Image: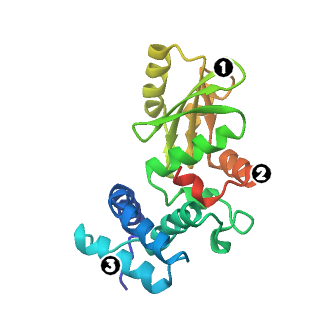
Amino acid sequence: MQVIDLGYFDEMQRLRRQLLDQYWPFVEPAVARLLNKQRTPLTQVQIQAVGALISERYHLGKVDGAYLEMLIKRLENQVLGFHSRTYSDSFRYITIADCESMTSTQFCRVVRKLFSRFGYDGLCREDHWLELLHTQSTRRLLIYTEVENRIIHLKDLYRIQSRKKTNNNLHAIFVTVGSFGSEVLDAFGQGGDVELWDGNQLGALLDRVQLPPGSMLD
């Protein structure tokens, strides 16, 4: 019996979405022109044609169809001025399970959007880092985001500790979809210099806030 390596397929999905993020800006203008011309959403055949064009032009073996459709629906919202029922915010929101299949960039965007609901504004940097400032106070946050579902150990926190000292940030948070090792909880679990958010805590917050799928694109 052949054993399927699920980790390999997860990694390939992340890579396909990362490449699609990279090449989409070059294809988006042509799709926008088509939408402006026909003034209706793209049909499934047209969406498949866009996927085939991207695959052929940029030599991609396979395009993530679901992610491409989300990109196109987002563009339809902008060009046509309405929200597609397929991806209406009332039908679907991002869960912790969704985060596990995201790229580092997409996950950083989701965490950024999550904190914006609590009055913070800022940018994702280098795929993993967020530097945020509260819009109504001087409170600053330094956040490291880890999308890989694994156990976080002490050595994984050295970078955020070092960057916190360099930038004189008042508060640092390590956000992961995974969990923290016992040595990390012993060192930081009782009010250490880095706040810890594991997958359970993040998942509960995502369920409460209910971010729309487009949050990973913003």
Task: Provide the residue designation for mark 2.
Answer: 208
Observer-side mark, 2 or 1, equals 1
Please name the amino acid that badge 2 sits on: Arg
Answer with the quarter of the image where residue 90 lies. bottom right
Q: So how many labels did they put on this image?
A: 3
Please name the amino acid that badge 1 sits on: Arg
Answer with the quarter of the image where residue 60 lies. bottom left
Q: Is residue 39 above or below residue 92?
A: below
Observer-side mark, 3 or 1, equals 3
Marks 2 and 3 sit apart, C-alpha to C-alpha, by: 38 Å
Q: Residues within 10 Å of mark 3 (few under 14, many from 20)?
A: some
Residue depicted at 60% across the width and 16% down the height:
170
SS at mark 3 in the image: helix
Task: Provide the residue designation for mark 3.
Answer: 52
Please name the amino acid that badge 3 sits on: Ala
- In percent of width and height, residue 183 lies at 55, 32
Indicate which disc, 2 or 3, sits on the residue closer to the N terminus: 3
- In percent of width and height, residue 55 lies at 29, 73
Q: Is residue 15 above or below residue 160?
A: below
SS at mark 2 in the image: helix
Return the residue nearer the eye: 208 or 19.
19
Q: In which quadrant will I find the N terminus?
A: bottom left
- In percent of width and height, residue 199 lies at 62, 49
Task: Provide the residue designation for mark 1.
Answer: 139
Indicate which disc, 3 or 1, sits on the residue closer to the N terminus: 3
Q: Is residue 186 above or below residue 111?
A: above
